[in-house]
Amino acid sequence: MRVLMIAPPGAGKGTQGALIAARFDIPHIATGELLRGHVARRTTLGQAVQTYLDRGELVPDQVVLDMVREAMVAAKAAGGGYVLDGIPRNMQQARATYLIGRELEMTADVALHLQAGDAELMRRLLARAALEHRSDDTPDIIAQRLALYHEVTSPIISWYRDRGILVSVDAMRSAQQVGREILAALDRSTTWLGAPRVASRAASASRMTRAQRSASGIRS
Ligand code: AMP
């Protein structure tokens, strides 16, 4: 199973990414976690990216792509599955991630989109701030991260819809309910993943329909 997640901050991609990784026994590659690890260890990379994280800005694409490439090479050696959490964040990263996947013969099977409204996300992130003390969980920085998501991340959703691998899940409910729905949708998707890959636009459109039907539980 190869999954990438597209979700605004606070939608639960860390929690759900860990759940997917455990369910399918695949590595959970979380770019935010990897970057925060570098900052905490005060590595050269950590020192270079700290200001971006503190301000809620995206770190330069190449930094994240190099990190992800290394993690995907390791994932390939570990069996070829993965769940990507935190990347892609913009169109350039979406294309580059696809190219890395193609080169390693492990492009994503499912682009999992977690949907949630800004007011709920702000509420969750402020609650998390009280517990975790992340430098980027302050009201101003949260607003900046949400704006960035709407501006540069959410436009990539239609790219995955066009490729026929988009699965959208309503993330406004409890983590447990959302997790159950995600696992059910991914289990259903393994049915259409068994089908041979198709190249033509028309064929990929028909595959999209099957995928979407499958994700919503409608039998085709
Ligand atoms: P996250 O834990 O996914 O919310 O990421 C926390 C922060 O790490 C983001 O606000 C960015 O500063 C940085 N970051 C994580 N992933 C990426 C990415 N794919 N591209 C650029 N910056 C990223």
Image (cartoon, rainbow, N blue to C red):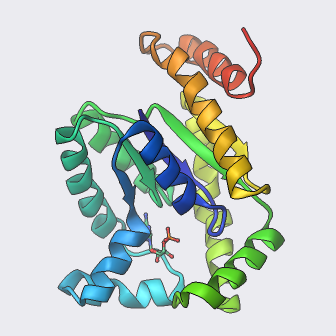
- Relative image position of residue 107 (x, y in whole percent): 36, 34
Task: Tell me: residue 142, above or below residue 206.
Answer: below
Task: Give the left or right position of residue 116, taking residue 204 as reference.
Answer: right
Residue 164 as seen in the image, left or right of residue 143 = left
State the quadrant of the N terminus.
Answer: top left
Residue drawn 51% across the image and 35% down it: 110
Q: Residue at x 24, y 35 (%)?
A: 79
Q: Residue at x 78, y 78 (%)?
A: 123
Please name whichever residue, 112 or 126, is drawn nearer the observer in this view of the structure. Answer: 126
Can you tell which quarter of the image residue 183 is in? top right
Measured as percent of width and height from the top left, residue 135 is found at: 51, 91
Relative placement, left or right, of 107 versus 211 is: left
Q: Is residue 211 left or right of residue 92?
A: right
Instruction: Decide if residue 23 is in sight here.
Output: yes
Vertical placement of residue 38 versus 5, above or below: below
Where is 63 relative to 48, above or below? above
Residue 45, quarter of the rendered image: bottom left
Q: Toward the viewer: 57 or 194?
A: 194
Residue ID at (51%, 50%): 19
Residue 128 % position (x, y): 64, 81
Q: Please state the total of marks drawn on the protein image.
A: 0
- The answer to which of 117 and 41 lies nearer the viewer is 41
Task: Provide residue 108's location: percent of width, then percent of height.
Answer: 42, 36
In this rendered view, identify the residue nearer to me: 171 or 97. 171
Q: Residue 137, can we see it?
A: no
Q: Quadrant of the C terminus?
A: top right
Quarter occupied by residue 49:
bottom left
